[in-house]
Image (cartoon, coloured by chain):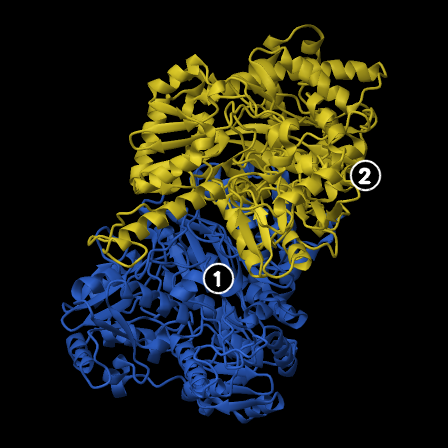
Chain colours: A yellow, B blue
Amino acid sequence: MHTLPSHAMRPLCLNPSLCSSRFPFFSFSIPIFHKFKNNPTIYKKSQKGPPFFSIRCCGSGSVTAKPSWELRRNRAAVQEPDEKVVALRQLFTKPGIGIDAYIIPSQDAHQSEFIAECYMRRAYISGFTGSAGTAIVTKDKAALWTDGRYFLQAEKQLNSSWKLMRAGNFGVPQASEWLTDVLAPGGRVGIDPFLFSYDAAEELKEVIYKKNLELVYLYDLNLVDEIWKESRPKPPNKPIRVHDLKYAGIDVVSKLSSLRAELVAAGSSAIVISMLDEVAWLLNLRGSDVPHSPVMYAYLIVEIDAAKLFVDDSKVTSEVMYHLKKAGVELRPYDSILSEIRRLAVEGAHLWLDTSSVNAAIVETYKAACDKYLMNRGSRGKTKNKQYFESDSLPVGPSGVYMQSPVSLAKALKNPSELEGMQNSHLSRDAAALAQFWCWLEEEIHKNMKLTEVDLADKLLEFRSKQDGFLDTSFDTISGSGANGAIIHYTPEAESCSVVDPNKLFLLDSGAQYVDGTTDITRTVHFGEPTAREKECFTRVLKGHIALDEAVFPENTPGFVLDAFARSALWKIGLDYRHGTGHGVGAALNVHEGPQSISFRYGNVTPLQKGMIVSNEPGYYEDHAFGIRIENLLCVQEINTPNRYGGIEYLGFEKLTFFPIQTKLVDLSLLSIEEMEWLNNYHSQVWEKVSPLLEGSARQWLWKNTRPITKQ
Amino acid sequence: MHTLPSHAMRPLCLNPSLCSSRFPFFSFSIPIFHKFKNNPTIYKKSQKGPPFFSIRCCGSGSVTAKPSWELRRNRAAVQEPDEKVVALRQLFTKPGIGIDAYIIPSQDAHQSEFIAECYMRRAYISGFTGSAGTAIVTKDKAALWTDGRYFLQAEKQLNSSWKLMRAGNFGVPQASEWLTDVLAPGGRVGIDPFLFSYDAAEELKEVIYKKNLELVYLYDLNLVDEIWKESRPKPPNKPIRVHDLKYAGIDVVSKLSSLRAELVAAGSSAIVISMLDEVAWLLNLRGSDVPHSPVMYAYLIVEIDAAKLFVDDSKVTSEVMYHLKKAGVELRPYDSILSEIRRLAVEGAHLWLDTSSVNAAIVETYKAACDKYLMNRGSRGKTKNKQYFESDSLPVGPSGVYMQSPVSLAKALKNPSELEGMQNSHLSRDAAALAQFWCWLEEEIHKNMKLTEVDLADKLLEFRSKQDGFLDTSFDTISGSGANGAIIHYTPEAESCSVVDPNKLFLLDSGAQYVDGTTDITRTVHFGEPTAREKECFTRVLKGHIALDEAVFPENTPGFVLDAFARSALWKIGLDYRHGTGHGVGAALNVHEGPQSISFRYGNVTPLQKGMIVSNEPGYYEDHAFGIRIENLLCVQEINTPNRYGGIEYLGFEKLTFFPIQTKLVDLSLLSIEEMEWLNNYHSQVWEKVSPLLEGSARQWLWKNTRPITKQ
């Protein structure tokens, strides 16, 4: 039973635009700046640590395969915080600044889930390295909001000049409330407008405006960077690589051409692409700028007859240069984005901006330039109206088209090459590495070896690293023994994490980035004798997993319609889980992507469509006892139903993940014959598909773990 | 397979406010005045004829138990339509009118599902008596919009001066488009503001305003009534009766007191209740003004220290008068509602108005009176602002509170007495009458008697009429043999309906109003040998019915979350049904009520709550072949689950309907063991509960029809 009160379940949303619109189904969110409306039942993702949509991983001691720089930073972060805060405050009164408070969020300029170290400004200024947190410094105060997952860590890391705001706890004010308490009316609150999506900044501006405070955009410098100076890590500069057409499936010229057709249809003449995975997908490029996601820091502007990539050109190899040139894409310095935006406005461009992801600096710059353009025209005597119209009522000046980026859906609908890459990476390599890992693990456990949760994550990485095309983990591995499996956002540290207990359930959620695909799989096992309770809960989670896997549904069905299928068996005995059931997954891209999802939240009405990839990951978490999750990736496909009522297509899922589900944990009395057949069929396919890749004990392990089960 | 194209599936919404907000889940709607947004999959209710939420029954030859006045009207309606239209046009130019077109909708002033004959103005003026239609008369044209269900009937009934607008057909303009085509810019379009909810009128106003037309409210007279004159039926005047406290459960004083507490909490000082079932429920009164619903035409205004019922006092017996007086409710003439609204505004009342149901005449009158009040205050020198605020920012003048009526939810949560009445009427009487009917029917069929669909409806009424406390059918009985069962909104006429074919499926959807409860049940049977196809479809509908019946879900779950449970088995083979799965049912009140529903449409986020009654009625309709529907009524109740994850309640359903489901139609190979057990348990309960009420052949019939089934 989960005993956390519901308000304590709302962790910090570092990235309001991710929380509220782009990825609304797997997001943690704490009402720091605003109360969230429309929350009939508060469920929260209680599983994966860092790599959740709205939670950026700052690396702090989480169970990661590459902990070196993170641990280094961890130690550095607690040094001399006072001096930093003092130095920051000194900037408040400088000419052109003149602020009474400065907000330091966790974001980068692209609303990324994983960010580069040089952008971890909140961790630098506060010393607190948890993935979720917002710092605010005023002339005499410094406060940091974080959620229940991080209270202990923040207590350790924050020094006495910082006040820890335990978000969600009774009586703890939201940041906007706190600001009005500590600032005099008329106070000026500074932000770096690159670090807030336009929608998030507008919402914040409105909230504090009501309290007589002014939000001030400081375009020209980030105050934390000013004091960070030479100790600030350099921006990542690993070379960009071309994502081979055999994996990408569609060449850049064709993608740009489709996008331009959408621009024309929407009445726009250019678009700013700011999400890093969208830039990478559109240009068939991959980068190494952030952990876990194969992307590079860049903006892309696509016009009807031009395309410009704003990127640090030291990362652009000659091969990439040639690749871009072929597609008519020019290079521009990363920092010149705003001047290009101004130029476009002056040229009268109707710019398509997805204000839920494009940062406030870009959108405000465009809007200001449009206003200026129109005023100039107006002052030339044509009209006094701010918006100038010709006789046919079409605006002749620049005007924005504010809609969801069309690249989001295009990227989600995988083409055959992308699907093939996803299948290959799952089958030929990830499943083999996993079999070797689990075989090794069971042997070690039976030898009574003491292995920590971090040891296991490291070992799994070792097996995966040996696979062809392996690049990185796709998120920080979640490796939780016993009660740790039930802790929301479990982030064990190498020094303090548990030894895996052979007499408890063990939950392992992990994934990899391969050159051709991205994986994400969770299995829960018991090394000894599970209790009846563990078996009942596991079996009901499995029933939910099967129900979703086998669902058939008419086209145009949003994911939330299917969510209850995965919960029904748990609901029957009064159990549930506080996270969504499925998220989108990129093809050799981000492990979490939109626009689709399968969740209890019904704000996301994006229909599930052929070629979309979603995870199927129901779970159950019993506080202080155990956590269970069973996760496969699925691809939406057409089902050849004997009827087609309404003349439409009926859709279902094809599995991408083939790996044994531990039958020892199944309570057969709770499984229907059909469900048993599903499990046996699945295991027979696993054996058939994965065994040819294995030999020796791993093959033996797979054989044992794919044997059919029967009632009695 | 359904071959109707989806656009042809959108019948006419006569009542935009019902369609769009109050009853959004079972509604037919055609975009006559506006396009509906947010319609990812167009499903439409394809079953019950007249008694659907947004479809008002005008009686036209539908299969009804009391067809006399309806058939009479049917014949009268086709006489002299030209003269009527000519007479109507002559009114356009009269002083104080001055319009270029007049819209005649089907509504009464209360957004009722069933209306009194004297308010059937659209049927009178056009001659078209179908339940769904909107007439518009201009100075030289007359047009009537209706949907595919009524094209044939409208062709027959409209004379040559009318143009039939086949709504949903390609190239047929919406009414607003048509108006802009046929009227010159600046044209004035008249409506009776009592016949549109405020929200619907506002939407219409906005749409035609964009096309340079003006919507004119004619408060003082309804132009159709002007020409209808003495031939217009008198308003209904049957006496109102007191709904016994033993059925109502809560006395009027307590209900008013709760309502007043809600008024205070909402910052309002009075409320206008305009939905007839809300007035009846709040005052523990019942009426006989319209068919099928035990309500009376009335408005109720509840103030903090007063309550006024606006009703024709000839319907008020001395018993009712005493009952009302005890509760502090005064009587006012029905027609004096607007002057009372004005008086309240002058007194500075903050009036709570549910603009989705309260008509435009009332809301506009209040708004105008508020404006006048505030202008008067303003001109006394206090301020020039229209809205006048004291220093503490609270409005001191009258101002409206525009929210959903609180009576809607209160009425939906049945108290123990209401539940007992519902159970008693279902069990002790409705089930007995149904058993007698089905026993009789099978005997007649086996004697090769030729019985029409209307004969059966009449016979069923005869059996029900003999039951204690029987008052009326709760909607027009839907009795469909073979292909008729698959026709959307089947409205057979006595002269032309089919003889029941013993070799085809027969669908019977019927219900009754008893003094203590309201019933609604559908059964589908075969009198001979069903085909494998019929059995497969029936069994999948049954699987859906069972899945919903057995659902357990956490509190705060809206009905749409459960809808897919009822469809899943059909979806697996590419089948579906184009209507919602469940609607609310009143306790000795309307057979369709909100605010809850179980439907694929997710606009209705009202959680299912303990004490709500919903129907469980999945179906399947194969064009030109057969229709299947299995409907029970359920009451939402708490389930005593072994766990309570999240510390909340888990809810499920308790059946109200106990009547055999024909096992001959079940394909056992498709039923799981658990589903078979459900069916056998249900039948065992049916026998146990219903057999004591029966004797002779009906008891014998029940015995035969409640025997358990076994595999093999």
Query: With B370 as the anchor, is A519 left or right in this view?
Result: right
Front residue of A430/A177: it is: A177
Identify the element where label 2 is drawn: loop
Q: Are marks 1 and 2 in contact (CB under 8 Å)?
A: no
Inter-mark Cα distance, 1 to 2: 63 Å
**A534 and A401: which is toward the camera:** A401
Secondary element at image label 1: helix
Q: Residue shown at 56%/71% (left/top)? A: B406
Q: Amino acid at mark 2?
A: His
> Is residue B539 visible to the viewer in this orientation of the structure?
no
Closest to the camera, between mark 1 and mark 2, is: 2
Disc ID at residue B440? 1
Please report the residue visible at 19 percent of the width from the left and 74 percent of the height from the top.
B100
Give the percent coordinates (x, y) of residue A606.
46, 42
Q: Is residue B434 left or right of residue B73?
A: right
10 Å crowding of disc 2: few (<14), some (14-19), many (20+)? some
Q: Name the residue type under label 1.
A: Trp
Q: Position of residue B278 (x, y in %)?
A: 52, 75
> On screen, A585 above or below A164?
above
* Position of residue A297 measured from the top left corner of the image (x, y, whole percent): 51, 28
The circle on residue A624 is 2
Question: Label 1 crowding class (10 Å Cα cut-off): few <14, some 14-19, many 20+?
Answer: some
